[in-house]
Image: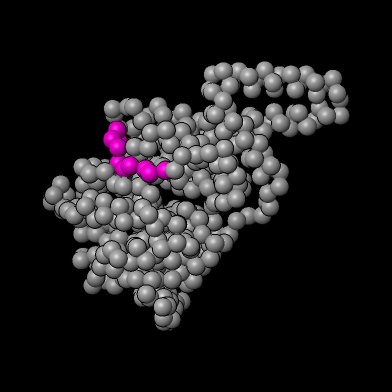
């Protein structure tokens, strides 16, 4: 039975008043340098910074227990808190999550629900100096988090640390969902490296410095896709660095993709989200160039489709275009395989349709996201070192 209580957040807890946004402020925040070690004194190598783990969930009742159990094991050495953000699940995800020592928040409307929104909400409610983002279908690996946390705390201008997901054949599908063929190639290549690499963005499990996130406003809650890329590009534009460790940081339990996967992406707004990210970057040439470079295969394919449309008025020219297209598709099928060719062609075509039919109005600003509508289902244990300062949220509008 659901019991109604007072609102989980009031005007004093608006985004601009939230600790996540004001701890150092947008304008006054300084990039990390060697002096950052002073935050931890001479015991920097021993003390682990307070950690908030934000777990994003939607209809993951069958997997949320394994995810939260692994989070608890991986963070035993930390002063930590866990914040589960549920995106209006229709199964028992919220009930399962509430059985764990974690705060459980719920986004009550599908119109407000997206992976980026969950990350934005979780970071806004978190109190740690570092924030680890984990999807609820990922089981964290042991043995990497403590070293990553110390590295993030002491390395100059380092904003985030990530790694690789042990997801086998799902890697290519997941990467293509993030961008296009270019991202897939990057994931498959760097997945075999034995060295730490500086990268432009982090995907999947990622550990961020809370101040660095605040300096760019955090994840953009209105982006329906490419939120990881966009955040990474914003951070590197501001002079921060991101590194990817040569280690597996989690096991990603994805369902096998089917031929209906592009339809699923379309329904959840992925392709329109790409257009959103491009529009959001229009005021910053550097960001826009970064996105277009990542999407270069998609851009080329969409330009080729435009050429085909332009030749419709001239049948001989269209015949030439069609012949070249058939040869190109045959070459792709020969080199990439039929399944991969199908994935790329449907991706490019649906992206073309999304761009052509997109409502090209500027997305709302981050501070317009209605945090006051977020429900706090359960308030879990907070950070020991932060309790005197109060939490960023109060008991929400629903308890179970």
Left or right of 303, for residue 76: left
Give the percent coordinates (x, y) of residue 174.
Answer: 46, 39
Q: Is residue 88 above or below residue 41?
A: below
Residue at left offset 24%, top offset 46%: 145
Frontmost residue, 122 versus 288: 122
Residue 361 at what x, y percent from top left?
Answer: 66, 54
Left or right of 356? Residue 375 is left
Residue 53 sits inside the magenta stretch = no
- In the picture, residue 298 is in which quadrant? top right
Tell which of 292 and 94 is nearer to you.
Answer: 94
Camera-side residue: 152 or 383? 383
166 in relation to 16, above or below = above
Q: Main secondary structure of the magenta part?
A: strand
Q: Quadrant of residue 217?
A: bottom left
Residue at the image position 37 percent from the left and 66 percent from the top: 95
Q: Which residue lies at the image location 22% right of the left edge and 44% below the top edge?
A: 142
Q: Is residue 251 magenta?
A: yes
Identity of the residue drawn at 29% across and 72% down: 390
- Residue 146 lies left or right of residue 365; in this view the side is left
Res 334 seen here = yes
Quadrant assignment, res 380 = bottom left
How many marks do you count on the picture? 0
Q: How is the image coloured?
A: one colour
Residue segment shown in magenta: 245-254
Q: Give the camera-side residue of 160 and 134.
A: 134
Residue 146 percent coordinates (x, y) = 21, 46
Height in image: 257 above or below 381? above
């Amino acid at each position: 039975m659901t019991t109604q209580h007072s609102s989980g957040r009031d005007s004093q807890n608006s985004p601009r008043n939230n600790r996540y946004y004001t701890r150092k402020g947008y304008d006054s925040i300084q990039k990390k340098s060697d002096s950052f070690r002073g935050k931890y004194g001479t015991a920097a190598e021993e003390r682990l910074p307070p950690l908030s783990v934000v777990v994003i969930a939607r209809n993951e009742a069958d997997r949320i227990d394994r995810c939260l159990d692994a989070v608890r094991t991986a963070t035993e050495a930390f002063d930590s808190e866990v914040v589960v953000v549920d995106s209006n699940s229709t199964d028992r995800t919220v009930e399962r999550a509430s059985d764990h020592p974690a705060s459980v928040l719920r986004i009550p409307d599908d119109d407000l629900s997206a992976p980026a929104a969950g990350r934005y909400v979780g970071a806004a409610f978190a109190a740690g100096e570092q924030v680890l983002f984990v999807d609820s279908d990922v089981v964290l690996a042991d043995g990497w988090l403590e070293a990553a946390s110390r590295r993030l705390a002491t390395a100059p201008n380092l904003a985030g640390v990530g790694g690789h997901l042990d997801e086998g054949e799902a890697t290519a599908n997941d990467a293509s969902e993030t961008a296009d063929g270019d991202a897939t190639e990057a994931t498959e290549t760097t997945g075999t490296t034995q060295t730490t690499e500086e990268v432009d963005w982090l995907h999947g499990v990622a550990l961020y410095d809370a101040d660095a996130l605040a300096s760019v406003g955090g994840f953009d809650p209105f982006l329906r896709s490419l939120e990881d890329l966009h955040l990474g590009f914003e951070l590197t534009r501001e002079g921060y660095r991101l590194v990817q460790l040569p280690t597996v940081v989690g096991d990603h339990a994805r369902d096998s993709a089917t031929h209906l996967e592009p339809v699923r992406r379309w329904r959840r707004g992925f392709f329109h989200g790409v257009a959103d990210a491009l529009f959001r970057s229009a005021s910053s040439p550097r960001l826009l160039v970064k996105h277009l470079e990542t999407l270069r295969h998609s851009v080329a394919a969409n330009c080729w489709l435009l050429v085909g449309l332009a030749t419709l008025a001239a049948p001989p020219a269209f015949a030439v275009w069609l012949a070249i297209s058939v040869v190109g598709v045959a070459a792709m099928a020969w080199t990439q395989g039929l399944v991969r060719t199908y994935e790329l062609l449907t991706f490019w075509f649906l992206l073309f349709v999304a761009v052509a039919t997109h409502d090209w109005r500027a997305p709302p600003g981050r501070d317009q996201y209605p945090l006051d509508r977020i429900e706090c289902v359960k308030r879990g244990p907070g950070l020991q070192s932060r309790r005197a300062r109060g939490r960023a949220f109060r008991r929400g509008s629903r308890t179970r």
